[in-house]
Amino acid sequence: MILMNEVYKTYANGVTALNGINIDIEQGEFVYIVGPSGAGKSTFVKLIFREEKPTNGNVIVNNMDLSDIKEKRVPYLRRNVGVVYQDFKLLSKLTVYENIAFALEVIEESPRNIRQRVMEVLEVVGLADKTKAFPDELSGGEQQRISIARAIVNNPEIVIADEPTGNLDPDTSWGIMETFEEINSKGTTIIMATHSKEIVNTMKKRVIAIEDGVIVRDEHRGEYGYEI
Ligand code: ADP
Ligand code: ADP
């Protein structure tokens, strides 16, 4: 479902972030991306939702070669790939309900379907009572749950998370991980870049380690493998 073939990424400033990546991720997998700061983890996940384009090589997601899809096809890709960020990226002037409904309004769903789907995903993340709240009235963990709800509202086949627990305390982080587990158990592929040794070592999923833009380790039921 996600294939990378000899992928290289050099940014405009000359920094090479990825240096020959080959990977094959199947539907339904839960994959941790680990490695030191600056190793290329963010760049790797950004390629999957075409936030960045490779300088060389092919990135294939759901049989679409992202290197040559037309700009107007990008929204279709994005519907199939939900994204969760470390800093949530919720719109502060919109309510919880509006933040989530937004992704459905742009694809012109009917108001009735939007209402039903927004409430469904709020149930999944356990915040159905917060529809009218604004993001800054919620705790960090609650805001992250809302951003997860937004990421899954289109029923994507893939959810990408870049350090989703990076701003959260350990207890809150475990709650967030349970939510990701639940989403994965329904068949959604999850790719998560993380610095949390505890989470990776406890969950025993596939671990891909990147260092200096190269995959140095790819293990099923893997370990974090770094001290911090
Ligand atoms: P990680 O997520 O593992 O910290 P990144 O993929 O963010 O690594 O960064 C890999 C390298 O690419 C780093 O040297 C970083 O400074 C550089 N980099 C990341 N984004 C950009 C960018 N937009 N422009 C230039 N260099 C970048
Ligand atoms: P995160 O680590 O939370 O994913 P970013 O993706 O914003 O953060 O940045 C990752 C790394 O890439 C950081 O080291 C940052 O300094 C570097 N970086 C991001 N954008 C640029 C840029 N435009 N030019 C140079 N380096 C960048």
Image (cartoon, helix red, strand yellow):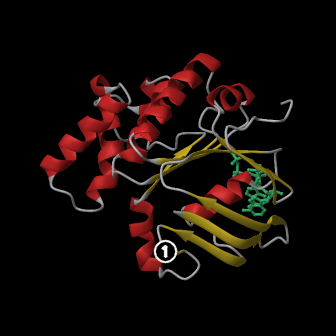
The number of numbered badges drawn on the structure is 1
Using the image, determine if residue 50 lies above or below residue 204.
Answer: below
Residue 181 screen position, x and y as percent = 49, 33
Residue 164 screen position, x and y as percent = 59, 37
Left or right, residue 24 beside residue 88:
right
Residue 160 screen position, x and y as percent = 54, 50
Left or right, residue 166 beside residue 214:
left
Q: Name the residue under label 1.
A: 64
Left or right, residue 113 beside residue 101:
left
The residue positioned 43% from the left and 37% from the top of the image is 185
Q: How crowded is mark 1: few (under 14 residues within 10 Å), some or many (20 or more)?
A: some
Using the image, determine if residue 59 lies above or below residue 118.
Answer: below
Residue 161 shows in the view = no
The residue positioned 28% from the left and 23% from the top of the image is 129
The local secondary structure at tag 1 comes to strand
The residue positioned 59% from the left and 16% from the top of the image is 171
The residue positioned 50% from the left and 80% from the top of the image is 69
